[in-house]
Amino acid sequence: MDASAADAEESGPTPRSDVSAAVAHGQLTNLKDFEVVEVLSQDPLNKSIALLGRFAGRPDDAVLLLARKPFDAADLPALAGPGLELQLDFVNDVYSKYVGRPPPQHSGITVDLVYPATAKHVQKHREQKRIMVIETPELYERVVLPYIRAIPPARLQWVYNILEKKKEVERMIFEDPDPVNGFMLHPDLKWDQTSPDQLYCLALVARRDLACLRDLAEPHLPLLENVRDKGCQAIQQRYGVPASCLRVFLHYQPSYYHLHVHFAHVALASPGAAAGKAILLDDVIDCIKTCGSDVWRRRTLTYQLGEADELWRLLGAGAQGQ
Ligand code: G7M
């Protein structure tokens, strides 16, 4: 380490460009310059907490997700600070994942950092009111589809980084390179790969013209069956978890509009696997076969929406929920 770097370490915050570069290159080794601004949400059941913070002297927001046994607010200054040693798992665009080596009194913390975080990232993790909304095909065409089309492509940067093998390459579990029916399978950001009964993997389809469930029709059956069959097979081979122990599903609405499929261990009680969010891939396939090719365009879909979601405002969800 040169003299200036040593000075910065001892006497004050790391220069702005250093923190951004350290995060982008996965070289963050502790959170000494991190200041907690707000506790966004807590989930004692899942032993996790989401924090809004900033790095000293920098204007950008950061979202920090810590997961372990339920948190004691008094521990936060030590925990989201110099005592926590970081070991890089991977970096992808503004998303990075670490294993945190906490001070001796703490143990087993995963550290997910989104930096710089947009207002959308912050809102997503803030405790919010949720309601169920009913989306008719007419509402989809008039409100939801234009909303999806207006999302800046940059939101999918992390997906394209994976598909172009710029990120998470060494984490890849399986690849079928076929441009029409192919996909890549990776551990989901949510899973630290330590325990197979917490298994959570994500299949990203290779083609880029399918945004979500509403786009799926009869010509996509070979793709969907391929993802299900080869995805389950690859998970069985790598982790020893059989297809009968996997919940394989899509989200509607998803957070990211590039078609992807979730593979979660059936024992995992994840909010993302709940009714009103998850739709089983087998049901998606069977519906197309039994109800017709355009069934997912014709169906009225009921799902949960958070107050912070842009769709809440566009669908007048507040009014629907009163
Ligand atoms: O709700 P939706 O179906 O859009 O879920 C997207 C999934 O992608 C979630 O389960 C996230 O945990 C996962 N995910 C999000 N990001 C930003 C990443 C990432 O950078 N890498 C990986 N492997 N998974 C991600």
Image (cartoon, rainbow, N blue to C red):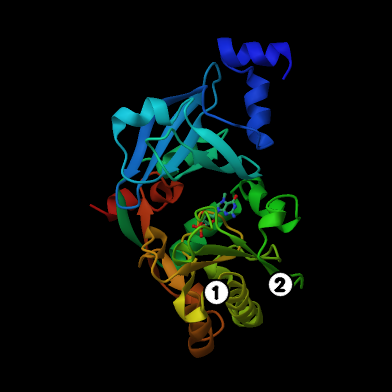
Report whether 194 appears left or right of 126: right
User: Where ligand 1 lies, by image quadrant?
Assistant: bottom right
User: What x and y, as percent, mark residue 153?
Assistant: 66, 48
User: What x and y, as percent, mark residue 91?
Assistant: 64, 43
Label disc, if present, on residue 85 of the rendered structure: none
Q: Residue drawn at (76%, 70%), measured in percent from left and top? A: 177
Whichever of callouts 1 and 2 sits on the residue coming sooner in the sequence is 2
- The answer to whether residue 37 shows anywhere in this view is no
Label 2 sits on what residue type?
A: Gly
Report whether 147 appears left or right of 41: right
Q: Residue drawn at (64%, 78%), measured in percent from left and top? A: 230
**Marks 1/2: CA distance?**
23 Å
Label 1 sits on what residue type?
A: Gly
Total label count?
2
Quadrant for the N terminus in the image: top right
Along the line of sight, the residue nearer the viewer: 33 or 82:
82
Q: Residue furthest bottom?
A: 290
Report whether 157 appears left or right of 47: right
Label disc, if present, on residue 240 of the rendered structure: 1
Task: Name the element at disc 2.
Answer: loop
Report whether 44 appears left or right of 9: left
- The answer to whether residue 87 shows anywhere in this view is yes
Residue that carries the numbered disc 2 in the rendered image: 182
Q: Quadrant of residue 2?
A: top right
Residue 147 higher or lower than 1, as above or below: below
Q: Residue drawn at (37%, 59%), measured in percent from left and top? A: 271
Residue 282 higher or lower than 192, as above or below: below
Residue 289 higher or lower than 224, as above or below: below
Task: Name the element at disc 1.
Answer: loop
Question: Mark 2 and mark 1 in contact (Cβ < 8 Å)?
Answer: no
